[in-house]
Image (tube, rainbow, N blue to C red):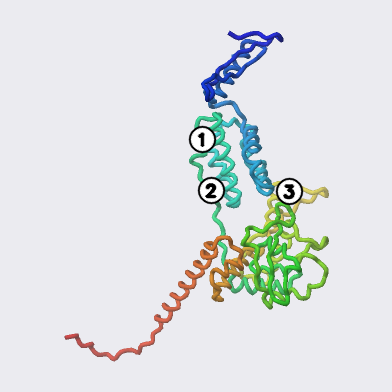
């Protein structure tokens, strides 16, 4: 029977177990009314004895996902990862599911959610998958749901462009633009060093030993934080050869006083993401103009302008009453900084540089990454060799035999 305390509240004692000495362990429940006391006793029994039995609770996904992130994920990840998780959750997951009850979300709609985002990068899709799986796994443990709808989810990736070395026309265009464009030094550095984009932008004059002809890679530019950041891995700290061609491109800019080799036009600091993307589009357009035969694609800024026109301006008029003109697509080379990195690896292979040295120059943490590229290039060379053999034997080198019967063998 519940007892009433001096302050008018009801109080009850619940035995939740026994300690190592066999003595009972008690927990106490108190409430203003008998009904509330019974509810509190039930809660204590579930917490200490029975576990949480009430599945399919009425819990909103948004509140539950926020609690999951703050309790289980945020304390164990760094600043960069927190930025990525926040972007994935706030931009994609929350708008789609935050006002739904967790128990109402089905496997099919989660799969469709991923399918609709197949155009995103592999990293973003992986984060989406990870967040959804972990939230629903925790919800199953907490008794919010009776079955996990993410068990059969599959990743839906867009067909990824295969990175390759530059072909002859692209090399010609890249080197021409590198020598003649105001921002061409970026292309020279990428072409002759194979640096990652962030590493190239983080390069400072003090990192270049012109006398011994070496470049030291010790930092990069992190576009997420818009600041100098750490390199990708320990193996990324490395020295790479300074080629005479790159030294010739760098020499005229020495002594200007800037810290970074590739600097922002105003601050003399490193390029930020927006500035780099604008500069790179200019280089893409210049390469296509220099060599119209190379592979091309519409530039991202051109796509955005046309999408904005379709969404906001199509069929409308400006303040002067004139109809908005539909923007024409603008094209440029398909090349990204990573193409130049793959090309550098191809040059090393064709020059006979062993795979361990190539791994060191490229800053790969796993030699299997370098081996995979070398194996691909080796396969390509084997195919080229096979074509040469076929071409050699296809030539009619034998003279026409005289019109005589060939004697039979005895």
Precedes in sequence: disc 2 or disc 1: 1
161 sits to left or right of 286: left
Precedes in sequence: disc 3 or disc 2: 2
Total tally of numbered discs in the picture = 3
Say whether marks 3 and 1 touch (CB < 8 Å).
no
Q: Is residue 300 above or below residue 379?
A: above
How far apart are labels 3 and 1 at the CA level? 45 Å
Tag 1 secondary structure = loop
Locate residue 243: give its quadrant: bottom right
Considering the image in quadrants, where does the C terminus appear? bottom left
Looking at this view, is 104 or 240 the one in front?
240
State which mark lies toward you, 3 or 2.
2
Looking at this view, is 286 or 402 the one in front?
286
Identify the residue at horizontal 79%, vertical 73% (top origin): 254
Considering the image in quadrants, where does the N terminus appear? top right
Q: Is residue 288 visible?
A: no
Tag 3 secondary structure = helix
Task: Indicate the position of residue 2 as horizontal and vertical percent values.
Answer: 60, 9
Task: Indicate the position of residue 312 as horizontal and vertical percent values.
Answer: 72, 46
How far apart are labels 2 and 1 at the CA level? 19 Å
Identify the residue at horizontal 67%, vertical 12% (top origin): 32
Q: Is residue 385 above or below residue 164?
A: below
| Residue that mark 1 sits on | 148
Residue furthest out toward the bottom: 402
153 sits to left or right of 203: left
| Residue that mark 3 sits on | 313
Looking at this view, is 238 or 266 the one in front?
238
- The numbered dot on residue 315 is none
Task: Indicate the position of residue 289 as horizontal and vertical percent values.
Answer: 68, 69
Tag 2 secondary structure = loop
State which mark lies toward you, 3 or 1.
1
- The numbered dot on residue 156 is 2
């Amino acid at each position: 029977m519940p007892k009433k305390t001096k302050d008018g509240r009801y109080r009850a004692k619940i035995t939740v177990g026994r300690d190592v000495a066999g003595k009972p362990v008690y927990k106490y429940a108190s409430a203003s009314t008998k009904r509330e006391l019974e509810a509190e006793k039930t809660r204590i029994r579930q917490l200490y004895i029975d576990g949480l039995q009430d599945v399919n609770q009425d819990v909103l996904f948004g509140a539950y996902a926020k609690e999951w992130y703050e309790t289980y994920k945020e304390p164990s990840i760094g600043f960069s990862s927190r930025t990525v998780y926040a972007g994935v959750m706030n931009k994609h997951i929350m708008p789609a599911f935050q006002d739904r009850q967790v128990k109402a979300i089905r496997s099919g709609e989660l799969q469709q959610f991923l399918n609709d985002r197949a155009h995103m990068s592999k990293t973003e899709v992986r984060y989406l998958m990870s967040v959804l799986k972990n939230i629903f796994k925790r919800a199953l443990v907490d008794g919010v749901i009776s079955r996990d709808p993410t068990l059969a989810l599959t990743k839906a990736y867009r067909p990824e462009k295969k990175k390759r070395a530059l072909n002859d026309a692209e090399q010609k265009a890249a080197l021409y633009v590198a020598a003649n464009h105001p921002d061409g030094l970026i292309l020279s550095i990428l072409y002759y060093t194979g640096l990652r984009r962030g590493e190239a932008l983080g390069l400072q004059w003090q990192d270049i030993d012109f006398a011994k002809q070496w470049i030291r890679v010790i930092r990069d530019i992190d576009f997420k934080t818009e600041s100098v950041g750490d390199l990708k891995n320990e193996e990324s700290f490395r020295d790479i050869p300074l080629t005479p061609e790159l030294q010739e491109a760098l020499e005229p800019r020495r002594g200007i006083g800037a810290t970074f080799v590739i600097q922002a036009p105003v601050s003399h600091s490193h390029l930020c993401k927006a500035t780099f993307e604008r500069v790179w589009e200019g280089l893409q357009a210049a390469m296509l103009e220099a060599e119209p035969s190379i592979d091309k694609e519409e530039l991202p800024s051109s796509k955005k302008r046309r999408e904005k026109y379709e969404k906001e301006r199509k069929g409308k008029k400006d303040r002067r009453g004139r109809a908005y003109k539909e923007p024409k697509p603008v094209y440029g080379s398909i090349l990204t900084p990573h193409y130049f990195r793959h090309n550098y690896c191809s040059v090393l292979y064709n020059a006979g540089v062993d795979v361990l040295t190539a791994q060191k120059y490229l800053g790969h943490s796993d030699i299997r990454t370098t081996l995979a590229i070398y194996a691909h290039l080796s396969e390509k060379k084997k195919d080229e060799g096979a074509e040469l053999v076929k071409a050699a034997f296809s030539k009619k080198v034998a003279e026409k035999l005289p019109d005589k019967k060939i004697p039979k063998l005895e």
